[in-house]
Amino acid sequence: MDTKKTALGIEFGSTRIKAVLIDFDGKVLASGVHDWENKLVNGVWTYDLDDVKKGLRSCYGALRKDVETKYGVTPSTFGAMGVSAMMHGYIALDKNGRQLAPFQTWRNTNTTKAADALTELFDFNIPLRWTCAHLYQRILDGEEHVKDIDSVFTLAAYVHYVLTGKKVIGVGDAAGMFPIDSGTMNYDAGMAEKFDALMKKSGYKLKLFDVFPKVLVAGDDAGKLTAEGAALMDETGTLKAGVAMCPPEGDAGTGMTATNAVAPGTGNLSAGTSMFAMIVVDKKLKKLHREIDMVTTPSGFPCAMSHANNGTSDLNAWVSLFHEFCGLMGVNADMGELFGKLYTHAMTGDKDCGGLLAYGYYSGENVTFINEGRPLFARMPSSNFNLANFMRVNLYTSLGAVKLGMDILLKDEGVKLNRMTGHGGLFKTPLVMQKILAAAVNSPVYVMSTASEGGAWGIALLAAYLVDGKNDGKLEDYLNNRVFKDLTGEAVNPDPEDVKGFEEFTRRYVAGLEVEKAAINSMKW
């Protein structure tokens, strides 16, 4: 292996940090993972930044060992590398690079006042999880640390800063910090001026362009791996400084890249702990929708996103319960096989899930304007309660909030969707989630053979584009002509009966939100 002709991508997901090494045409050569989990500390969903660094080292160590085992070499360099992570959130540092407050992840919904105020000020939807909302909420709450802020980052931008010393960010990730002007490929200047005036009125000298990272687009030089960064990543000391790094991106941008959904009319759904569907658009929406995020592709195209805070967490918890039961019965069930059998069995259930209802709300859900979460399962005495329907309703509800946002885009706004592609581990079981997503959006859905590689593969592709792919032209040209040229992916068209069943489930889902609200008010232990 000539590691100078490879690209390394590392993505910090909600429950797993994953590294993927590819050649410049996108072929996966090696991988490594590190499992981790967020914590609820004093009412804040967070990760310790020391765990971020430890997880980075562990993940890279697993990849290095995979390379050594497969190719007999210990990598000392790569052609390029990149970092991506969960979007949004809030990491504040002082002028000496010291952390000033707990890292607030995208999962926190404690920013309602700030998000509402900024939405009104900008006449542009500012979701609860966006970085500017977190910053302004800290001001509204009178937090002492604000006066010492020098820099504010997302997780990807922070890790990139640790590895390179550069305060930069990819435009797709930046679009989850503050509104982007796709004409300038930068933070919207008019809105930034209003934000700065708000800071001044609040008694602070903070200026957005000073404290937020510099915005870059796909293919821009984002610095090089420093000696300190290399030492942090590789405990053996073999990895050397100087590796070219692409702009750090959020998981939305890497999901678009990994599904070749970066041109207008293309869309994708990323299935994980959070669930989000995106469609790249070529014109502004007719009106402001609080349920819809307007972000960008890594190249800066505007993109409408339906983002749900809750995805597969509750679904995974139920499968773990069944795994525990298997052990009680003396059956040593493989988790992968168990997921596959349960998902496949779900497709034998009633199209409307037999009247069952579930909410996987581990945390608040911005699409339905609910600020706390209580996972729930409910049924009527007359419901058809069996295993197939139980699994089917939990698969349906993982898309429940996303479906409401997609209905706004496709039905109310008339957004054009030529191709929808699914990716993430939820699509590993053939056809199951593909058919369900097709029913939810009433459109053909593709799943590529690389679907389970996810965002780590996507950021590796952006790293490869930096050093080799630009010879092909724009990012979409590189993806079309080289990466996805020979990749197979079969479209599944929506079954009219599945569509009808999902619509009936959606009707119950909306009506039952009052049950979820009652649970939040009642369950305080």
Image: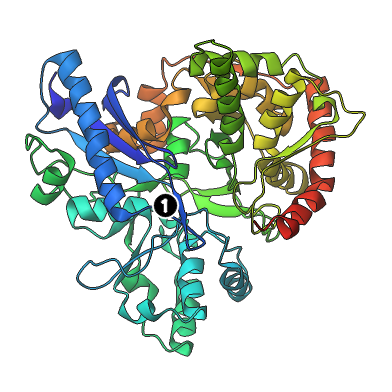
Q: Position of residue 387 (x, y in %)?
A: 73, 19
Vertical placement of residue 336 versus 179, above or below: above
Q: Position of residue 129 (x, y in %)?
A: 53, 59
Q: Residue furthest right?
A: 382
Residue type at numbered disc 1: Asp
Determine which quarter of the picture holds residue 394.
top right
Q: Quadrant of the C terminus?
A: bottom right
Determine which quarter of the picture holds residue 59.
top left
Q: Position of residue 225 (x, y in %)?
A: 15, 46
Q: Nearer the viewer, residue 118 or 399?
A: 399
Determine which quarter of the picture holds residue 447.
top right
Vertical placement of residue 152 versus 80, above or below: below
Q: Residue furthest top?
A: 331
Q: Is residue 265 left or right of 377 when viewed as pictured?
A: left
Q: Nearer the viewer, residue 235 or 453?
A: 235
Q: Residue at x 48, y 77 (%)?
A: 195
Q: Nearer the viewer, residue 263 or 307?
A: 307
Q: Position of residue 229 (x, y in %)?
A: 15, 48
Q: Quadrant of the N terminus?
A: top left
Q: Residue at x 35, y 23 (%)?
A: 482
Q: Is residue 50 left or right of 105 when viewed as pictured?
A: left
Q: Residue at x 42, y 52 (%)?
A: 173
Q: Residues within 10 Å of mark 1 (few under 14, many from 20)?
A: many
Colour scheme in use: rainbow
The residue singled out by tag 1 in the image is 173
Vertical placement of residue 317 versus 250, above or below: above
Examine the rendering and report whether any part of residue 247 can be seen.
no
Q: Tag 1, which secondary structure?
A: helix
Examine the rendering and report whether any part of residue 403 can be seen.
yes
